[in-house]
Image (cartoon, rainbow, N blue to C red):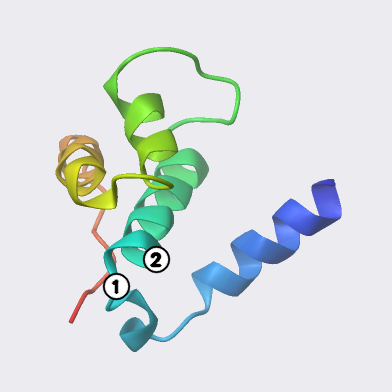
Amino acid sequence: MKVLIATAITAVTFMPVAAFADDASYCYQLGQTYRRVVGSNSFTGGPVPEAIEGCKTDPKSSIPILEKALRDNKVTLPKRD
């Protein structure tokens, strides 16, 4: 399982910018960036973990929450077309 997660994170990290043209992919990348740079996989409750989970079903609502959380933590957002 850890190998699968590490592989997925590596694959997403090196995806070209065009890969984030759809909301779900971009939202997923924001969530992974937050986990890698700001938080961990062990946090519970609050708007950010809920937004990360929301990427699966409602990325349009989750994206602004994740973007704000990353900007608040001085993290550069991934480029998006």
Please tell me how crowded label 2 is: few (under 14), some (14-19), or many (20+) other residues with Cα within 10 Å: some
Instruction: Indicate the amino acid at tag 2.
Output: Ser
Residue lying furthest top in this view?
Answer: 45
According to the picture, the residue beneath numbered tag 1 turns out to be 22
CA gap, disc 2 to disc 1? Answer: 6 Å
Q: Residue at x 53, y 69 (%)?
A: 12
Horizontal and vertical percent for residue 75? 27, 49
Front residue of 33/59: it is 59
- Image quarter for residue 68? top left
Mark 1, secondary structure of its residue: loop
List x then y, in percent, for residue 35: 48, 40
Relative to 34, say whether 43 is above or below: above
Could you say which quadrant of the image residue 53 lies in? top left
Q: Crowding near pointer 1: few (<14 within 10 Å), some, many (20+)?
A: few
- Label 2 sits on residue: 25
What residue appears at the point 42 percent right and 86 percent down from the top-left corner? Answer: 16
Which amino acid type corresponds to the residue marked 1 in the rendered image?
Asp
Q: Quadrant of the C terminus?
A: bottom left
Q: Nearer the viewer, residue 57 or 21?
A: 57
- Residue 44, given in percent of the width and then of the height, sits at 49, 14
* Relative vertical location of residue 41 with respect to residue 42 in this rendering, above or below: below
The structure residue drawn at horizontal position 43% and vertical position 47%, both measured from the top left corner, is 56
Q: Are marks 2 and 1 in contact (CB under 8 Å)?
A: yes
Which residue is at a point 51% across and 69% down the rendered structure image?
A: 13
